[in-house]
Image (cartoon, helix red, strand yellow):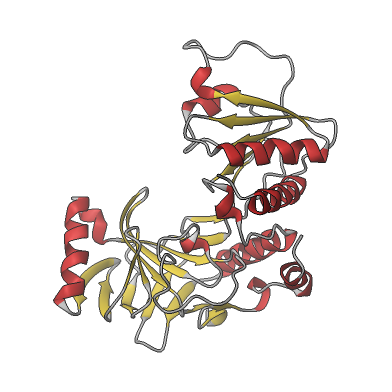
Amino acid sequence: MRSESVYRRSVDIMVRQLELCRAAPGRPAMVLSDDATDPALLDATIHALNQIGALPTSVFVDDLPPDGPSADPTMPDIVVNLLNGYSDAVDSLVPSNARVLSVVAHSTGELRGIVPHVGLGRRVKRGMDLLDAGQELHVGDDQGTNLRIGLRGTRRWMHDGLATAPGTVAQWPRGMIGTAPALGTAKGTVVMSPGDIWLPMGWYARSSVVLTFEGGRMVSIEGPRSETDAIRAHLASVDSPSAYRLDAVEIGLLWIDSPGPPALFEPGFADSFGIADRYGHVVVTTGDHPTVGIACCLRNATVAVDEVAAVRAGRPQGELAPDVYEQAAHRFPL
């Protein structure tokens, strides 16, 4: 049984996000769903598009004929993808010039605390500019983390949840910037302290564990056996030498409202929706994308690019921090 207050709030959130993605009155829209889609999320999406004045068409991909959809002369301006994953059906249904908003939340409840605002896109762009101009990134904290990676010529990525240009695909709700290290440059230590989060397992660290990197690879795992045995077992299960290679450092910029800051071991927080993208979280990942060895989610880390602070003790700084208008939107949400 759905909560009507949660549903109404999710419609308001959807309306604002779709407006940021330039959904417009009188323009055709398409909503893709399947048997795994939350019915309330589907209803909220169509309701939001109708409230904007767009002209939505709902496509249930499980009912499509084997040879694909029949020709439709009405090409959508924006496509809202509610499928659990970007399936082949999306490629067959979506024209190349359409904007695609892929909703990674699986229920209306997971939209709770999301406040769509153009400021997130600005902060993500400024973070990418900082990475693009940098030579070295340093991750540290007062528990002993001291990791440095080179940035020259590396792969970078971002998510801001905005599908504003023709032919773009955006995942939402998301908000982060990330970089791979220059080959062989990762060197130093990552200390997982109690309350930090081991991903993708969704476990809280219960004791301090020290990961040491040299030449771009993890060379040691030190800490209590109760903690390190589980990590070693997980890495062994990946069954790939790349599981020990440092693959990425990501900075979460997605502000999700909550009644109060989570406790150190808040029940359900470690595996909650969008945990890696959350504001101020720093994730250090090993593996070979998309295969993840481990991902260390540091909740109180400091990050500097060429000694310019981007995050300090879990709080984004400077141009990565929300301006007064974005702060006001969170104080007085829709």
Res 272 → quadrant? bottom left
Q: Is residue 235 left or right of residue 270?
A: left
Q: Residue at x 27, y 69 (%)?
A: 215
Estimate the x, y position of residue 82 in percent, counting from the top left. Answer: 56, 37
Identify the residue at the far bottom of this view: 142
Residue drawn 81% across the image and 40% down it: 52
Name the residue: 26% across, 66% down: 217
Residue 305 in view (yes/no): no
Q: In which quarter of the image is the C terminus?
A: bottom right
Residue 80 x, y percent position in the rendering: 64, 36
Residue that appears at 67% across and 53% down: 5
Residue 322 falls in image quadrant: bottom right
**Location of residue 49 in the rendering, given as x and y in whole percent from the top left corner:** 75, 37
User: Which residue is at the front of the view, 114 or 182?
Assistant: 114
Q: Is residue 324 visible?
A: yes
Q: Nearer the viewer, residue 109 or 294?
A: 109
Residue 199: x percent and y percent?
35, 62
Residue furthest to the front in view is: 1
